[in-house]
Amino acid sequence: MAKEIISTSNAPAAIGPYSQGVRLGNLVFTSGQIPIVAATGQIVEGDVQAQTRQSLENVKAVLEAAGSRLENALKVTVFIKDMNDFPRINEIYGQYFAANQPARSCVEVARLPKDVLVEIEAVAYIEA
């Protein structure tokens, strides 16, 4: 089984030596997605909720490019700058994962790329 590199113009281009995502068999692993708008290359304007929404849209774009979707997420990891933002992040997150919620970890970190407030990565499956 060979790994397949996933790349889409609907999510921000990698800003380092990594891929937007990798597919192996029926599994897809996304890299952490920060709230960059793919069309502009700029960080989305707004608060942590706007950044969460954009990060999830970027995860969604990578999953879709691999032939999967958010509803197929098995595990999501959320990295946040300030744990005090957790309730506001969770509100947006819940809109994207209203049913069949994946396993999730949420970790407060000292700093994220480009000093954003949130970064999100996912592992999902592709339906046969």
Image (tube, helix red, strand yellow):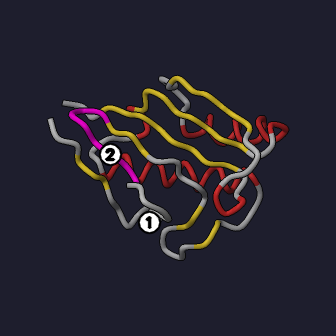
Identify residue for label 2. Answer: 22
Residue 125's x, y, as percent? 32, 32
Quadrant showing the C terminus: top left
Identify residue for label 1. Answer: 13
Please tell me which residue lies in front, 90 or 20: 20
Please tell me which residue lies in front, 114 or 96: 114
Residue 10's x, y, as percent? 41, 63
Q: Is residue 101 above or below residue 111?
A: above
**Tag 2: amino acid:** Val
Please tell me which residue lies in front, 125 or 18: 18
Residue 23 part of the magenta segment: yes
> Which residue is depicted at the point 24% across and 31% down?
127
Name, please, the residue furthest toward the left. 1
Quadrant showing the N terminus: top left
Residue 99's x, y, as percent? 51, 26
Residue 53's x, y, as percent? 61, 51
Q: Earlier in the sequence, mark 1 or mark 2?
A: 1
> Which residue is depicted at the point 29% across and 48% down?
66
Name, please, the residue furthest toward the right. 84
Prevailing secondary structure of the magenta residues: strand
Residue 56 part of the magenta segment: no
Q: Is residue 17 above or below residue 105?
A: below
> Which residue is depicted at the point 81% across and 43% down?
82
**Residue at disc 1, secondary structure:** loop
**Tag 1: amino acid:** Ala
The magenta span reads 20-27
Name, please, the residue furthest toward the bottom. 40
State if disc 2 and disc 1 touch (CB < 8 Å).
Answer: no
> Which residue is depicted at the point 28% across and 42% down?
23
